[in-house]
């Protein structure tokens, strides 16, 4: 049980996918214009992550190594499709707000990254908790970013006005998303530099720096080509 | 014809795939250090998006719709795109080596580019016909090319600048992208 709690702590704090590993940037930037959207996207991703980790961990001895990535993609895509129908039926407001970003959960680096680096190598229970931890960490990060952009940009919290503050509109628009993420990465770099560590490599340092991404498999191919 | 050009312009400039829809951010940030590699990546994206939109359109309307299997859209599209990229890579390697040399390195990185899947899905969601789908696919891919080449230009110019340490690398690239996104909002009134 202790190791399961460790997985939760690892996902939420120590290796938080957004704040620490800086993974899955497309949804992070696209849907954090409000707290509701950010939390909704985080929870949707968490559901897919837990279910896909569970199934991949169960099948880890059956899936042949050579076709593991397509197999993972099929499993993840199936759960995304199920999730899409559930949202259409029970939470149409969230479904409309997130739109095309729901089917795009399939290509979220975090999900295939966890499948490749954790669920395909570990037993079922730790894999579920790994998915839960990573999912909660992602939800927490998207909620914080969503709340931050909603308060600064629109001057509201969950749609309720803050008296005496109109907001700086640019922060709920596309450019604001880039600025907020830039500030976040800079803060992380500042903390690491003060602690005497090197800044963490992220996407902008070349695709080979992208550790959790499914493209890491492709990276090997790219290296061979070179 | 005018409608098609407007669709292409709209997806390239007004709803730019990276700067306003945030699709394909990983290659946008990852392969934008030099202008010529950025242009290569952009060209490869145009190539793959055009082919994959054509194929996914055909599969959706000729196979999935007649069989009432529309709900398999996401699963089928991602698999088709992944397989297609591999296939294109092999064909280019064998038959058009110069093009393979120019695009080859970038092709494997495109498989999981969310812009490719994004265009395929949004063409279906918007109910576009075949010609409009192709126009929007080309516009999207061309918008990606414009954005990545401009960003690469900015990054080349600012390489030697004295930037505060925590802002070096990713944060500065993101701020440059944000400023470009502000500039691109100027296109809003275009159409």
Image (spheres, grey):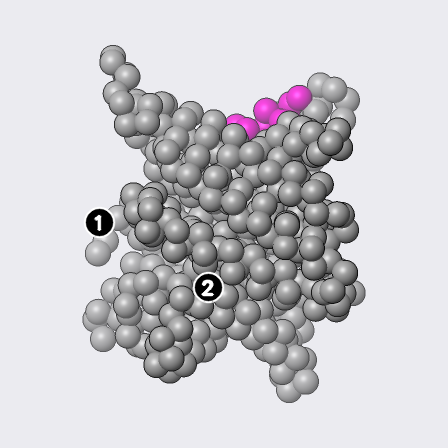
Residue B47 on the magenta segment: no
- Please provide percent x and percent y for residue A167: 30, 23
Q: Is residue B134 above or below residue B181?
A: below
Secondary structure of the residue carrying numbered label 1: helix
- Please provide percent x and percent y for residue B101: 67, 73
Query: Residue at position x 42%, y 25% from top?
Result: A148
Query: Residue at position x 39%, y 51% from top?
Result: A86
Q: Residues within 10 Å of mark 1 (few under 14, many from 20)?
A: few
Give the number of the mark in front: 2 or 1. Answer: 2
Among the 4 quarters of the image, the one containing residue A154? top left
Among the 4 quarters of the image, the one containing residue A170? top left
Residue that numbered label 2 is attached to: B74
Judge whether residue B151 can be spotted in this image.
Answer: no
- Please provide percent x and percent y for residue B100: 64, 76
Query: Residue at position x 70%, y 42% from top?
Result: A125
Residue that numbered label 1 is attached to: B189
Judge whether residue A187 can be spotted in this image.
Answer: yes
Quarter holding the N terminus of chain B is bottom left
Magenta-colored span: A183-191
Q: Main secondary structure of the magenta part?
A: helix
Of labels 2 and 1, earlier in sequence is 2
Q: Residues within 10 Å of mark 2 (few under 14, many from 20)?
A: many
Q: Is residue B53 left or right of residue B14?
A: right
Query: Residue at position x 57%, y 54% from top?
Result: B27
- Please provide percent x and percent y for residue A187: 59, 24
Q: B73 or A155, which lies in front?
A: B73
Secondary structure of the residue carrying numbered label 2: helix
Q: Is residue A43 above or below residue B32?
A: above
Q: A167 or A161, which lies in front?
A: A161
């Amino acid at each position: 049980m202790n190791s399961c709690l460790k997985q939760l702590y690892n996902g939420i704090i120590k290796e938080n996918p957004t704040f620490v590993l800086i993974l899955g940037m497309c949804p992070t930037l696209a849907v954090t214009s409000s707290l509701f959207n950010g939390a909704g996207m985080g929870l949707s991703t968490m559901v897919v992550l837990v279910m896909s980790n569970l199934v991949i961990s169960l099948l880890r001895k059956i899936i042949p190594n050579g076709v593991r990535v397509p197999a993972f993609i099929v499993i993840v895509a199936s759960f995304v499709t199920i999730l899409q129908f559930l949202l259409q039926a029970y939470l149409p407001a969230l479904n409309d707000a997130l739109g095309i970003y729901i089917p795009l959960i399939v290509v979220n680096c975090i999900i295939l990254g966890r499948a490749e680096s954790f669920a395909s190598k570990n037993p079922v229970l730790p894999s579920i908790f790994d998915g839960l931890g990573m999912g909660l960490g992602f939800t927490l990060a998207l909620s914080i970013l969503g709340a931050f952009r909603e308060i600064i940009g629109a001057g509201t919290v969950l749609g309720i006005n803050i008296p005496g503050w109109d907001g700086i509109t640019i922060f709920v628009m596309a450019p604001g998303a880039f600025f907020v993420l830039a500030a976040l990465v800079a803060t992380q770099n500042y903390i690491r530099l003060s602690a005497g560590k090197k800044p963490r490599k992220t996407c902008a340092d070349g695709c080979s720096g992208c550790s959790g991404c499914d493209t890491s498999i492709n990276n090997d191919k790219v290296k061979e080509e070179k | 014809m005018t409608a098609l050009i407007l669709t292409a312009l709209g997806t390239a400039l007004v709803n730019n795939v990276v700067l306003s829809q945030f699709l394909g951010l990983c290659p946008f940030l990852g392969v934008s250090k030099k202008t010529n590699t950025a242009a290569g990546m952009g060209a490869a994206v145009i190539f793959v998006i055009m082919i994959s939109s054509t194929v996914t359109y055909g599969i959706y309307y000729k196979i999935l719709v007649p069989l009432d299997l529309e709900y398999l859209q996401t699963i089928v599209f991602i698999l088709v795109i992944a397989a297609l990229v591999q296939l294109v890579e092999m064909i280019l390697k064998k038959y058009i080596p110069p093009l393979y040399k120019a695009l080859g390195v970038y092709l494997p990185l495109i498989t999981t580019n969310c812009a490719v899947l994004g265009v395929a899905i949004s063409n279906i969601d918007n109910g576009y016909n075949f010609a409009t789908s192709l126009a929007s696919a080309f516009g999207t891919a061309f918008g990606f090319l414009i954005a990545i080449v401009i960003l690469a230009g900015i990054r080349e110019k600012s390489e030697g600048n004295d930037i505060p340490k925590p802002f070096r690398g990713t944060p500065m690239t993101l701020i440059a992208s944000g400023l470009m996104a502000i500039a691109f909002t100027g296109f809003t009134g275009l159409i």
